[in-house]
Amino acid sequence: MTDVGKTPFIKELASSDKKLRDKATASLTLFLRAKTDLSNLDLLKLWKGLFFCFYHSDRPLTQQALARTLSYNLVPTLPRTTVHKFLRAFWLTIGRDFHSIDRLRLDKYLFLIRCYVGVGFEVFLKANKGIGNGAGAGDAAEGKKRKREEENSKKGGKKRKGKGQQQQQQQPEEEQQQDTKTEGVDLAALESYLAILEDGPLCPLNFDPDQPPANEAEDFVPMPHGPDGLRYHVMDIWVDELEKVLEFEEVTTAEGTTAKKPKGPVPAELLLRPLERLKKESPYKPVRVRAAEALDDERLVEWGWKERKVESDSEDEDEDEEDEDEDEEWGGFGDE
């Protein structure tokens, strides 16, 4: 693979000229569509170039346009064979280099991270609705292949009957595969993507001594767990980005009020699983508290994903006792 970090389209992505950025985006998209067999190491090299391309982009509008170009314009066009590896390379690069981002550039990277959380939901929650299907050239090639097979079957005369019988035998297997899909949501693809996040920025552990080391021969690079700054940001924007992707309808509750409910079946338990794991399994109290705050979001109650918490009298008494202890002043050393 050529050193993509030095190719012209990587540098042009950070240009303030919109025409150059659009041209560079088209070149990058064509490159990723053509190279459907890219390894994890290849994509890490690519993201190293993209990371510094974004690092050197100036002016807020240019930075926001580039962030959307690298996320919402690019990721939905990727072939299925590339999309998970490309997203993993992004989260690995961000987790590895997050500490190197200075305070003057932090805001634009936080926006880029927000875009990637959002586009991940868009790609895997709208997989079969023609929006962000993560298919690209892969699906186009499969479509052409099916069309050729149908044309050949029509020309085959008597052989068409035998092929039809084979198709009938294959139908149960296809039905089993469709069980993993729920109203346009490919649950297997969504779960694979969430597993990437649970292994990276949303991992309960900051350091795992049992994590295998990098092995270039097997094309494996371990995912950084965290850091906490990245973990907190992803938790803070999780429900915000979900709300942008989900489709809602207004329903009347038993109390006679109106509430927003997501349309169709949505895998709520799967989507909240990373936050639930952080709340239960993180050894650090600040992380558990931040995860609990994200799960206590009022919107989750309105959507019917969580039940409203009812504080018991004993909890109120414990809180009052804690407040009283905090209010007590130190009286100094007593007389001996």
Image: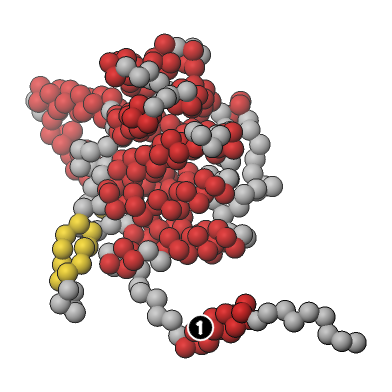
Q: Who's the residue at 63% across and 33% down the image? A: 214
Q: Position of residue 129 (x, y in %)?
A: 20, 42
Q: Who's the residue at 87% across and 87% down the image? A: 335
Q: Who's the residue at 10% across and 22% down the image? A: 155
The local secondary structure at tag 1 comes to helix
Residue 81 appearing in the image: no
According to the picture, the residue beneath numbered tag 1 turns out to be: 315
Q: Position of residue 161 (x, y in %)?
A: 12, 34
Question: In the depicted view, which residue is nearer to us: 328 or 244?
Answer: 328
Q: Residue 86 occupies which quadrant of the picture?
A: top left
Question: In the depicted view, which residue is nearer to us: 325 or 125?
Answer: 325
Identify the coloring.
Answer: secondary structure
Q: Position of residue 211 (x, y in %)?
A: 64, 44
The C terminus: image quadrant: bottom right
| Kind of residue at badge 1 | Glu
Q: Position of residue 316 (x, y in %)?
A: 49, 84
Tell me: residue 124, above or below residue 331: above
Q: Residue 312 occupies which quadrant of the picture?
A: bottom left
Question: In the depicted view, which residue is nearer to us: 137 or 198?
Answer: 198
Residue 25 appearing in the image: yes
207 lies left or right of 16: right
Tell me: residue 25, above or below residue 330: above
215 lies left or right of 189: right
Q: Who's the residue at 56% across and 28% down the image? A: 219
For the residue carrying disc 1, how many other residues have a C-alpha within 10 Å: few (<14), some (14-19), or many (20+)? few
100 lies left or right of 169: right
Q: What is the number of callouts on the image? A: 1
